[in-house]
Structures are given as C-alpha cells and as structure tokens.
Amino acid sequence: MGLMMKNVKMLALAAATTAALSAGSVQAEQFYGFSNVSVNYLDWSDGTTERTGGYKEDFVYLEVEGGAGYDWGDVYGFVDFENPTKGEWRKADETVKEKAEAFRIAAKGSVAINMGDSNFNYYGQLYSLSDSSGFYEQNVTLGVSYDYNTDFGLWVKPFIGAHYVHNNFIGAGFNGYMGGWVLGYNFELAGQSMMITNWNEIEFDRADEYKGANGNGTGLNGAVALWWTPTPKFTAGVQYRYADHKLGAATYQNAVIFSAKYNF
C-alpha cells in the first residue's frame, strides 16, 4: 500500500505541476488543444500470453488524456486506470493470474520547450506505473526533440535523451538512452475525419541491472493506431500495440486495443 500511495502522490504532484504550467500559459498564444476520456479494451495475442507465462492477460482501462501547443512549446499527458474493477491490496501469495489482473495506474507527461525560433526543443517526459501487487517503475527521459509539420496533414516529433529509471526491485539510476517519435497523419475518407498515429520508443545501452528484467540491452515499445471521428464529440479507434524486450518480458509482445473516446 505504501508503494502505491508513494506513486499516486508523485502523479498528483506531476498533475499539479502541469496545471500550474498551463495556468502560466494563459497569456501565451495557443495553436491547438485537446482533451478526452476513453474506455479501452486491450486484447493480448495468444502467443504473447504463452510467451510471457501467463503474466499478460487482456484488460479494460479507463484513460484521461490531454495536450496543447503554445508559442513557447507543447505539453501532453494521460492517466490510465487498468483493471479498474479488479485487484486487491498486496498479498504475499499472489498467483500469476492475480498479478496479471492487478489494478494498475499508468501515467505519462511530456513537455517540449522551444529553442528560440528553431524547430528544436528542450524535451522531457515522465512515465510511471504502479500496481496493486506492490510493483512500481518510474521512467524519466531528458533530452531534445524536433517538430516537423507539413501542409498536407502529416506531423512528426522525434526525440532523444538520457534515460533514468526507478524500479522497486532493482533500485534507481541511469539506464542508457531513449529515442523515438510521435507522428500523426490527418486525412478524410468518404467525407469522414480520420487520423493515423504512431508512437515509438527505443531504449538502448541499458544498465546491466535493467537488462535482467527485460533480457536485452535494447528494448522497443509503441503502437500504431487508426482513429475515426464521426462527430466532434466522439472518436473510435483500433490500435496495434507492440513491445520487444520491454514491459518486464524478454520476448516480443503484441496486442490489439479497441478504444472509444468522448472529446471535450
């Protein structure tokens, strides 16, 4: 319970910091902004469940998400509540299935601050995960990013930075580097508003201590999605979720996620 509360307090602090940052941006020029809540179902492939020894089970999660772009930079964040109706307080004799069905809180926040008038940014992101079995991990990446925008609907935001990890099993420290990107392509199909997105993260030159849990010095993590917005208030999507030597498993993992969003 103590570990869970520690992580929840950290997330609350991150949320408060983001709110303060947004409040300080009232006088800034805003280029875009969005926020939504969603219900999502993640369906791991049978091969993933088999390769991970049952530690990966399908689950429902609720998500709160938002982001905005200003003349000084961009902010983005989400909080996920996985298995919201399952899980128990930590038990010493949990089975593999009980651990796979644990209640989890996952959250991510990122900020990109413009470097003058260039497309380069000072970049930072924080990802945190904790569950009802007592596990927690926090990932911090600090580096630079770049904004690439086109006039035909495509945008790409690559980044690279130093990677730091705090894990309750192995401790905390420098964990090599992380590079990746977020991209999107907005288009219309049969008069309908559509979007393709992809987020991708590659960890490399990991610390020896971290290799033990994930089986390799390099790890891959990401998702490709197709979104359909028939009305301004509703978005439906399907995502292909993938990870390799990541998420606590020394193997490839893949899933399909079905999502329904209410847009504010």
Image (cartoon, rainbow, N blue to C red):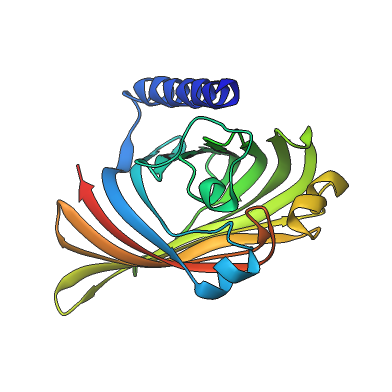
Q: Residue furthest bottom?
A: 190
Q: Is residue 221 left or right of residue 199?
A: right
Residue 147 percent across, percent down from the top left: 51, 53
Q: Is residue 237 left or right of residue 191?
A: right
In this view, the residue in front, 13 or 22, is 13
Residue occupying image coordinates x 71% and y 38%: 165
Residue 137 percent across, percent down from the top left: 64, 37
Is residue 69 among what the camera can see? Answer: yes
Res 240 → quadrant: bottom left
Residue occupying image coordinates x 69% and y 51%: 178
Q: Residue furthest front?
A: 93
Res 68 → quadrant: top left
Residue occupying image coordinates x 22% and y 58%: 235
Residue occupying image coordinates x 24% and y 62%: 236
Q: Is residue 234 left or right of residue 54?
A: left
Vertical order, 170 against 202 (above or below)? above
